[in-house]
Image (tube, rainbow, N blue to C red):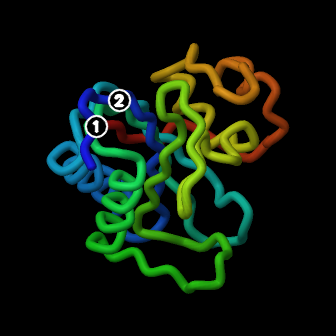
Amino acid sequence: MKLSASSKVIVGLGSNLGDRFSALERAQKLISVEAGEIMATSSVWETEPWGFDADDQFLNMVIVMNTTLAPKQLIQLFRSIEGRMGRRKSGGGKYESRIIDLDILLWENRVISIPGLEVPHPKIADRRFVLEPLAEVAPDAVHPETGLTVTVMLQQCADNSDVRLAGRQF
């Protein structure tokens, strides 16, 4: 089901396997062709793994896009893109290294709860690797449940993991 009007959606992208920059670039191209126009992109941030141990650092970024797809369609498309790019899940439900990860962070001012998708992303306020790039492209975006802006969430974030600008940007 397509929506009659487009929606502004904010998406987090991450990669810590293979050519991480190429994975982020390819994911953006697939999203722009299949899901909708990308309106803004953050810088690329290099971060340590969050919630699990891994040898490889992540590259993370955030995009702002317009889409006419419904939430269920968009998350299904993102899972398809992840699979086509080579992501394989172990099935244990645990955090793990990945070629690409696509997460819907915010969908305008909506709260969405359907199987396989919770928006706003349930851990958005706890993850500095999400909030730093998000603050670049949407510092005044408001969390529809807490009423906090991205800037305030970043200021209040207790996550002290290493998050730094990556050497190469798009």
Residue at the spot of label 2: 7
Provide residue 110's location: percent of width, then percent of height: 54, 31
| Location of mark 1 (residue) | 3
Between residues 48 and 95, which one lies in front from this camera angle? 95
Give SS at disc 1.
Answer: strand
What crowding class fits label 1: few (fewer than 14 Cα within 10 Å), some (14-19), or many (20 or more)? few
The CA distance from mark 2 to mark 1 is: 8 Å
**Residue 65 position within the rendered picture, expressed as x and y whole percent measured from the top left:** 32, 33
Give the total number of marks visible in the rendering.
2
The label nearer to you, 2 versus 1, is 1
Residue at horizontal 67%, vertical 75%? 94
CB of mark 2 within 8 Å of CB of mark 1?
A: yes
Q: Is residue 91 above or below residue 3?
A: below
State left or right for residue 119 relative to residue 41: right
Residue shown at the point (21%, 53%) measured from the top left: 30
Identified by mark 1, the residue type is: Leu
Left/right placement of residue 46 relative to residue 88 reads right
Q: Residue furthest left?
A: 33
Q: Looking at the picture, which amino acid does disc 2 mark?
A: Ser
